[in-house]
Image (cartoon, coloured by chain):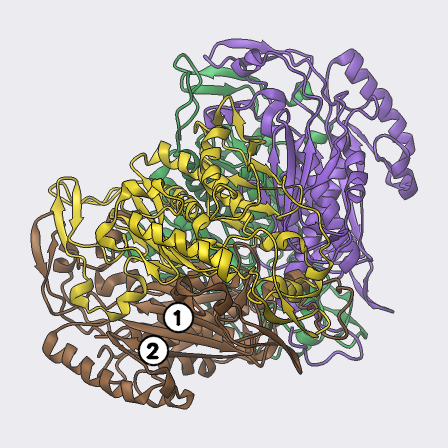
Chain colours: A yellow, B brown, C green, D purple
């Protein structure tokens, strides 16, 4: 939301470049007394870690996180939590050529234009390695949610790679963790594997992807109109992830084709409050959570670092061709799954705290006991 | 970004409800010396104003803006600019029934759950009337851009209503202002008119829409990684508009289907800096503007206020059917066009100032004179 | 804290100039369900209002506040509360001379240097009339405190005018509201009256003052280290008031002369938690409230608008003498008392909400039941 | 301003505890192209470093700063700069007793009450070791000022220890760096040395101090009314330093005793713009710098960690006596001098950038060429 910080009251700031000595995040505003240790965070970092299978970059990074502050005897103290991840696999090489040309589709040129200089080593600050810091911070957010809203569950998965989309009729939650793509449709996952192999080995190309992240068990009432809407913050959060070009809530872009009758999620009374006949809204109305599943999708563009030559210019304005060698993901979308989950956790933890700032977490009642509103 | 405020250094806060005495916006951080008067703002408010043709709500509001502060002798002084718009067509009626039920697809229920009480008159704060305040604030942003980045041009238009999408081969800039739908394809506009007529008169229904907003002439270098990316702020800005469910930059969700070779916008040297062979990126790389057209699209869901009955519950949890009478837009997307333009202007003005805070507006050079970076 | 806004989660933005049509404040983040009406705010505005006795400016302003948004049926809805105060006694005159010279000790010159232009009518934005908006916003904060922390009581009073300081041995709470100076020492108040009469009628001069504001009944635990300390925010709040040049907490500047033995407020166990043998700390340790009285003092410089000539320069750099005619307070400190109270209320309401964001308002226990810390 | 972050556009966040593995600061929003290395920062950290003479704590910390990000080939890149300082002299001991009692005058009790738990090792987050991180961040701010406003010079010094105040008639700039107290009056410095010796060795006591920080060569026009005033931010900045209880600008609390005639700093035309006959204002009018010296003073209370017993209570509420052994500064004010300088640099760098955001750094002219204001 503001340079390198995100969040209102549960706020984190990331720092670090791809090939510097380390990168990390400082998490501020965390409630006190939350059990936390490095293993809890490492679990999620391992999910994002490169080099785990042939479908992601072969860069080998342990991505071991160290907690440098904010803990005492295994619990948070309410003070800033510094999460540090050392870079270990920065291969030394000559960056002169990279500094003198601009990869088409890459932030090389805009960083140069904005700042007049840039760190060319592995993309510097624009590298997707920054997302390791988010995943670590997201791990803290998950523990906050576990303590304060224990029913919340967050799950991300890939629903499209290139032209190949999952078949929703085969959707299987339990399959998501069972393949290299976090794919809920094992049949399409097998096709993706072949396709990636072809792209990497034959076509010297890369491909885009679409990720969906769902949060279940989110209480109704999170979100703050008008410019702090839950969906507005989710859109900002997801669009801040490298290579993301679109964000949808619920039916997303498809609502343009719906009529009001179709789009209205009808309301019924359940045992434990309102229930809904459908979820076109993706769990958010007027910027505030309904208690339904929160459903967010985002697209990831194919990496611009490919072995196929593309036309470009040099720093001096001369025409050239760029071919990017090195250890690049043919589909960066795969590793964006845990990143999207982390951003969901971070936004929800922040809004949980922001809501209790304003309302004290007190809710307007629906049902026989509905009556005078309590004072928050 | 934070409750009812948006922006980093050029920041505005909106206030007011649909049926209160007035609503408005206070714009803070505006540069001094910018020529400004009410007529400049009224121009844009008139574009958004309801009741101008049969395709929008028949509520009659002059939406006359008054500037209460921040001006001296026709120029901004650098102090807060309060923009006030009186509500004049609030019909008095009994809101008891509205208070006791929840419209499916509407923020009624989430406002109740969050706050324990709500202003039922015309939707209160959740009404799209809030967007009048944004349009007024956006008018100030346009004058800032006119003074500091005079080449910037902003244009919004509708590209889809329901299932009917414009034919890009018929795209005509000059046609946009020539129909009630801000549609660049007059042929489809005629179809839309018939369709809306049917929805309103026969089907008692409403329909969604898709809006595209383009900003031309934006200098390269605006945007601030990582969480203050230009596209991250645009996503937040557009998603904060009532009824928006998806936001795309450039190729948007479609990048999931692209390969890296297709997606890379090739770079060539033009007379006046880099030029590009395509614009899949929508004018933004790494969160920073490239100098190409900035292209943003967003979807608008169909209004939930329709004459067709939908299942719902009462405050006491009893089942009921809701039919919404009153003066509602069958396609709220039409009036979202000037709102999207306003948000684009507001984000760009903010980033223009934020960029000169950090870099002084100095740019890294490309071309024969490229050399040591200047100090910003 | 940021241009014209103050506060973290309970945040207000003021706007307006001395001689424009109106000024006001928008209060954002207010909890829902708080009873509020204009009379509650008017009470405090009347206390600050000019022209009530011969000791303050003879400008006659009713300072009637209108609430334009954020209320429904007498209670706050959680949406922004716009408070509008019309200016009614702006005498028209020729401001050309004021625009062409700079009053020594006044913001005329710095506004000109910063912005290149300024509103000369009554000092424009730099006028103390801005404080009316704070007092109105402070009235909202008081109602939030009344609902959420009903034991809090806030009281401001004058402890010094010129060289004449109150005698603390005569301190009488009940006397504060009984004189025109909010003075707890009636004997010195009588001296002040004579002195002001002399300054106004004979000496054509003005004089400084010192104000003390005390908040009783503030719960322990408010404040957020390190840069959101309660005292850091109070210092910022008070220093933002026109003409303030110093802020003290507890013993303030005098702690420089104390030893550690003298300064340590010894702790004892009371019936209801810790009690203290003294209050050198002014109720704040480590940026967090102790539960003791919060004691803040600030100095107010004498107004620079006096009938005595002072050397200055013109816009063109020529030497000149400035004599300020008009309706000016000989001691602006008097009317700063309700302003200081308002800022105290605003800071406390904000920190009350900020604290419950992070900790849920749960407190670490001291006493027989002390044990494992709860999770906030 | 917000938990552990400070600044508007040049913003830093500190983290870390006294006895954790490390502490540090992340600086965000730094302009690109600024020459920076660790030695530039170490210079200032060495000035603050403990254990350098008998007048400060005997804790031995090299306080070596490492820059982990934001640099490329010796210049800032515009991305976050992480500054890390390892703690090396954390003596292991049993903290059980400290956890079970509260030092009078210390943040022990308020941290416990707010958070329900606290890190007792060396005071945890409330330790003055946090100020090492500020000094490092302040070193970055100094380099920004050196590049963008090279005439700015910042100097801090001690003007009072206990009852012993410097004699301003003996004020000698060149003496400041020549004694262990940063004292501009060598005669009083000798007295302070004897006094501290007595306090430490005989009296088992500590003492307060007063620090003055001056910034010369600051351009007119920095500061942003009303809640982002330069003095408001300076007050917040200085009050956030451990043990500070009062902040003054210019004549500070003493303005209460002045008349308007005395207080008005008369204006004359100099060769290079306005000059002033005096500086009661401390270089700030209406929250905006005048171009004169900016003069800030703050008081530091005596440390509460003394060998003399003070009455207190245990966690269980039982009466006890507290005697604090260990390596504590008898006058923490000495080491506050470089901290105050750092905060001055940080506030000025932030306001320099904030000003060019809004005005582009363009100034209203005074003199023969005064005329139409430029557009910022």
Which residue bears the numbered disc 2? Answer: B159
Which residue corresponds to the image point at 41% horizontal and 90% vertical from the top-left?
A: B174
Percent position of residue B38, x then y: 46, 80
Percent position of residue A301, x then y: 46, 61
Quick check: C352 above or below B206? above
Which residue bears the numbered disc 1? Answer: B297
The residue closer to the viewer here, A76 or C352, is A76
- Residue density around tag 1, few if under 14, some if 14–19, many if 20 or more, within 10 Å: many
Q: Are marks 1 and 2 in contact (CB under 8 Å)?
A: yes
The residue closer to the viewer here, C77 or C294, is C77
Picture quadrant of residue C354: top left
Name the quarter where the C terminus of chain B is drawn: bottom right
Percent position of residue D368, x then y: 80, 79
Question: Spatial distance from mark 1 to mark 2, Cα to Cα?
Answer: 9 Å
The total number of labels drawn is 2
Picture quadrant of residue D189: top right
């Amino acid at each position: 939301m503001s340079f390198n910080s995100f969040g209102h009251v549960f706020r984190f700031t990331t720092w670090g470049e791809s090939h510097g000595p380390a990168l990390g995040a400082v998490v501020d505003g965390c409630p006190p007394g939350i059990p936390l240790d490095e293993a809890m965070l490492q679990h999620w970092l391992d999910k994002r870690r490169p080099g785990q299978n042939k479908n992601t970059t072969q860069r080998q990074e342990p991505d071991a996180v160290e907690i440098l502050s904010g803990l005492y005897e295994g619990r948070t103290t309410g003070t800033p939590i510094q999460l540090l991840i050392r870079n270990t696999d920065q291969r030394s090489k000559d960056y002169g050529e990279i500094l003198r040309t601009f990869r088409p589709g890459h932030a090389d040129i805009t960083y140069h234009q904005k700042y007049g200089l840039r760190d060319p080593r592995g993309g510097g600050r624009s590298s997707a390695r920054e997302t390791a810091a988010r995943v670590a911070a997201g791990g803290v957010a998950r523990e906050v949610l576990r303590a304060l809203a224990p029913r919340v569950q967050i799950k991300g998965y890939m629903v499209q790679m290139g032209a190949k989309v999952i078949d929703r009729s085969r959707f299987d939650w339990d399959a998501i963790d069972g393949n290299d793509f976090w794919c809920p449709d094992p049949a399409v996952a097998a096709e993706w594997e072949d396709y990636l192999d072809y792209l990497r080995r034959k076509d010297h190309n890369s491909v885009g992807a679409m990720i969906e992240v769902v949060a279940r068990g989110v209480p109704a009432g999170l979100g703050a109109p008008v410019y702090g809407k839950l969906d507005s913050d989710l859109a900002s959060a997801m669009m801040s992830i490298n290579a993301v070009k679109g964000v949808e809530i619920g039916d997303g872009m498809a609502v343009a084709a719906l009529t009001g009758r179709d789009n209205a999620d009808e309301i019924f009374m359940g045992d434990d409050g309102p229930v809904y006949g459908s979820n076109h809204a993706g769990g958010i109305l007027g910027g505030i959570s309904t208690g339904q599943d929160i459903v967010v999708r985002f697209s990831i563009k194919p990496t611009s670092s490919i072995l196929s030559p593309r036309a470009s210019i040099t720093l001096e304005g001369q025409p050239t061709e760029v071919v990017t060698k090195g250890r690049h993901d043919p589909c960066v979308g795969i590793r964006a799954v845990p990143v999207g989950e982390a951003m969901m956790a971070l936004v929800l933890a922040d809004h949980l705290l922001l809501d209790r700032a304003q309302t004290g977490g007190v809710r307007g009642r629906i049902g026989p006991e509905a009556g005078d509103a309590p004072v928050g």
